[in-house]
Amino acid sequence: MSRISIQFLRFSVVGLLAVALAYVLYRLLISADLGSGMAYAIAYGCALSLSFFLNRNWSFQHTGRYLSTSIRFLVIHITSYLWSILVQQLTVHMIPPQNHGYEIAFFSAIAISTAINFVGSKFFIYR
């Protein structure tokens, strides 16, 4: 298996763990009447922390400087977050909750994030 394939597989495992964490928090916060936008922001932030730690140390086995890596990570993930929140909010407004709008919005936003984050991780963050 090639190096990039192993990295993508590990990145995917980390992503699944982060998405599971984010989804559980998202649903809990929505059920506490926090609102879908704020719930998504908090869930995303928690998943982001887990993602940085595991991807840096396991997926990409990066040994570079922590500060510069963290800054690059934040640049990519802020970009990813802005795109994903746009998708999430548009979807919530287009699909009512009774038609699984919250779920579709969440997973649509995650799909956008995944694409941006892997390319950014491989070629910018952990170069």
Image (spheres, rainbow, N blue to C red):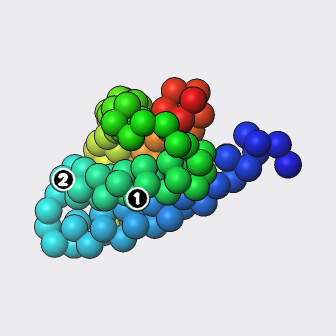
Quadrant assignment, res 32: bottom left
Tell me where residue 18 appears, x and y as whole percent: 45, 60
For mark 2, what is the residue? Answer: 38
- Which badge, 2 or 1, comes first in the chain's sequence? 2
Q: Is residue 58 visible?
A: yes
User: If the image is split into quadrants, where does the C terminus sit?
Assistant: top right
Q: Indicate which label's residue lies in the foreground, 2 or 1.
A: 1
Q: Is residue 116 visible?
A: no
Q: Label 2 to label 1, Cα distance in Å?
A: 19 Å
Q: Identify which amino acid the numbered label 1 is placed on.
A: Leu
Tell me where residue 76 appears, x and y as whole percent: 41, 31
> Which residue lies at the image location 26% right of the left edge and 72% below the top edge?
28
**Residue closest to the eye, 33 or 24:** 24
Tell me where residue 10 appears, x and y as whole percent: 64, 55
**Residue closest to the eye, 92 or 98:** 92
Q: Is residue 13 above or below residue 77?
A: below
For mark 1, what is the residue? Answer: 50
What element does badge 1 sit on? helix
> Which residue lies at the image location 40% right of the left edge and 58% below the top edge?
50
Compared across the picture, whether 25 is left or right of 76 comes to left
Compared across the picture, whether 34 is left or right of 55 comes to left
Q: Is residue 92 above or below residue 78?
A: below
What element does badge 2 sit on? helix
Tell me where residue 67 appears, x and y as whole percent: 34, 36
> Which residue lies at the image location 23% right of the left edge and 56% below the top edge?
42
Exactly how many numbered labels are in the figure? Answer: 2
Q: Residue furthest right?
A: 1
Q: Identify which amino acid the numbered label 2 is placed on.
A: Met
**Residue closest to the eye, 2 or 22:** 2
Q: Are marks 2 and 1 in contact (CB under 8 Å)?
A: no
